[in-house]
Amino acid sequence: MTTAEKLRDGSGHDKVTEKRMAELLGTTPKALQRKRERNVIPDHVWSKIDGRIMYSIWRYDEWLETQWGCPQELSLSQKAPPSDNRKKKNSSATILPSRKNCIEPQKNRLYILK
């Protein structure tokens, strides 16, 4: 379930406070603060408005999807066909692709010394 689906309280708001975002993600506001400071969560996902940190749930979900290294055809968002193993004794198991094949090599980092 995405963070946006957890928010379906009828309000339709995309922007939430850091405290509410932490609740939705199952973490603490302090952990989110540290991730912002270390640039783990990019700037376009959150914004400081009137001294308060606000998160865009939609942008967070979009950013999170970019963190997966698998090609689109191996996405977990695709639903597997339902199987009913109770009716068939000799049902064959579906073999899913391994995540080992999905790992992309890390890009070389460029450091600029001033």
Image (cartoon, rainbow, N blue to C red):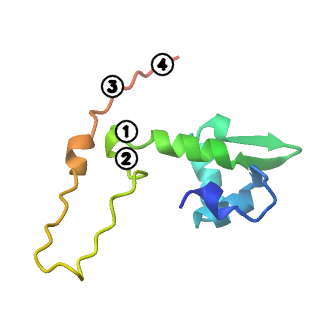
Residue 42 percent coordinates (x, y):
59, 38
Circle 1 residue: 72
Is tag 1's residue or tag 3's residue first in the polypeptide sequence?
Answer: 1
Is tag 2's residue or tag 4's residue first in the polypeptide sequence?
Answer: 2
Q: Amino acid at mark 1?
A: Gln
Q: Residues within 10 Å of mark 4 (few under 14, many from 20)?
A: few
Circle 2 residue: 75
| Disc number for residue 113 | 4
Residue at disc 4, secondary structure:
loop
Q: CA distance from mark 3 to mark 4?
A: 16 Å
Circle 3 residue: 108
Q: Residues within 10 Å of mark 3 (few under 14, many from 20)?
A: few
Residue at disc 1, secondary structure:
helix
Q: Quadrant of residue 59?
A: top right
Q: Amino acid at mark 2?
A: Ser
Residue 70 percent coordinates (x, y):
33, 41
Q: Residues within 10 Å of mark 1 (few under 14, many from 20)?
A: few
| Disc number for residue 16 | none
Is tag 3's residue or tag 4's residue first in the polypeptide sequence?
Answer: 3
Residue at image coords 76%, 54%: 16
Q: Is residue 88 above or below residue 113?
A: below
Q: Amino acid at mark 3?
A: Asn
